[in-house]
């Protein structure tokens, strides 16, 4: 039996649908979530997660949940749906058998702080870049930097996404603040390092640290505006982010990042800083 649910709170850029699959004894055996993006430039897209208990696989549960996802996406006039799964996993094979194609491959990596070359990282962070300075903040962007921070988000527009039909992400100050507030509400800490030149942000990198300062922190976006590339700002900012995380959260275990396999520049940055690959995922897409 499939039961449809609705997320009671729509976000500023999307809304979410959900389904619960149960067996004849009303025991849950699977679930699915479909995020329908509503921002301009992404309102053609649906992104989903689908999970089936191992004991109930190959019984039609996954197919029934996927049918609900596709029906809802088509009813909402979506152009495509996509899902990220571990490479060569049962979920990967399930989607491949149903016509989903690989549109992006991501490599996940971790910097273990206990064994990282922190002296080398601090050296990179301490090397000045002529004409640039680093600024940092936690949580909401300071009012005096809000407009230039919004403008700097276009640095992500040409990030390698291969064949994924994500579309552009349109940012404004309310959206930036909503994203920061969401992280704060769940008890985590958002730290941002930005490179500034002549009062304007040229690039940025974001790190989200668990609320208790332990475990692993997660890198979010890192980008440098095209007109400021060639100065190794991404390496500089990320090294400073690592340095500050180590100082502010001495019990932090490591830092996590994920990068498209075709994003050779950012992969080289991560390599220089000592990140070690952990696993790969694929983004599979179905055009509707």
Image: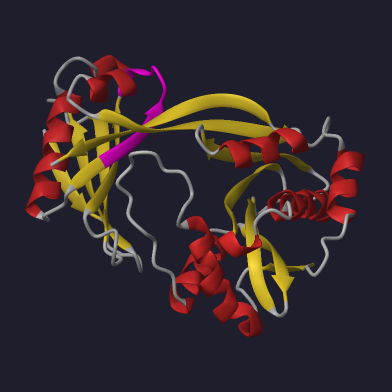
User: Is 86 covered by the magenta stretch?
Assistant: yes
Name the residue at 26% across, 63% down. 38
Q: Quadrant of residue 271?
A: top right
The reply, left or right, for residue 170 in relation to residue 79 is: right
In the image, residue 240 lies at what x, y percent?
79, 54
Which region shows up in magenta? 82-91
Q: Is residue 35 visible?
A: yes
User: Is 268 covered by the magenta stretch?
Assistant: no
Q: Is residue 101 above or below residue 12?
A: above
Q: Which quadrant of the figure contains the C terminus?
A: top left
In the image, residue 247 lies at what x, y percent?
85, 53
The reply, left or right, for residue 243 in relation to residue 178 is: right
Name the residue at 11% across, 55% down. 77
Q: Is residue 225 visible?
A: no
> Camera-side residue: 184 or 170?
170
Q: Quadrant of residue 157?
A: bottom left
In the image, residue 116 lies at what x, y percent?
82, 34
The reply, left or right, for residue 20 in relation to residue 72 is: right
Q: Quadrant of residue 148?
A: bottom right
Q: How many marks?
A: 0
Q: Residue furthest bottom?
A: 144
Q: Which quadrant of the figure contains the N terminus?
A: top left
Q: Is residue 228 above or below residue 122?
A: below
Name the residue at 89% across, 55% down. 126
Give the color scheme: rainbow, by chain, secondary structure or one colour. Answer: secondary structure
In the image, residue 91 lies at what x, y percent?
32, 23
Q: Is residue 205 above or below residue 54?
A: below
């Amino acid at each position: 039996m499939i039961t449809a649910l609705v997320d009671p709170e729509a976000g500023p850029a999307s809304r979410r649908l959900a389904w619960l699959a149960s067996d004849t004894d009303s025991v849950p055996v699977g679930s699915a979530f479909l995020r329908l993006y509503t921002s301009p430039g992404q309102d053609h897209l649906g992104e989903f997660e689908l999970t089936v208990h191992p004991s109930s696989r190959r019984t039609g549960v996954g197919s029934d949940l996927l049918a609900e996802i596709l029906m809802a996406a088509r009813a909402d006039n979506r152009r495509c749906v996509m899902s990220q799964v571990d490479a060569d996993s049962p979920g990967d094979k399930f989607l491949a058998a149903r016509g989903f194609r690989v549109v992006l491959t991501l490599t996940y990596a971790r910097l273990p702080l206990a064994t990282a070359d922190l002296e080398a990282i601090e050296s990179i962070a301490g090397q000045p870049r002529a004409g640039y300075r680093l600024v940092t903040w936690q949580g909401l962007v300071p009012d005096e930097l809000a407009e230039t921070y919004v403008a700097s988000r276009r640095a992500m527009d040409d990030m390698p996404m291969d064949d994924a039909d994500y579309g552009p992400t349109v940012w404004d100050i309310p959206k930036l603040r909503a994203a920061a507030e969401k992280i704060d509400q769940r008890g985590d800490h958002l730290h941002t390092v930005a490179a500034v030149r002549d009062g304007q942000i040229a690039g940025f990198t974001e790190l989200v640290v668990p609320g208790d300062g332990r475990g692993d922190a997660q890198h979010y976006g890192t980008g440098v505006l095209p007109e400021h590339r060639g100065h190794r700002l991404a390496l500089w900012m990320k090294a400073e982010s690592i340095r500050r995380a180590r100082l502010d959260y001495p019990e932090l275990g490591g830092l996590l990042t994920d990068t498209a396999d075709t994003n050779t520049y950012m992969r080289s940055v991560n390599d220089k800083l000592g990140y070690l690959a952990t696993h790969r995922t694929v983004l599979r897409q179905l055009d509707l």
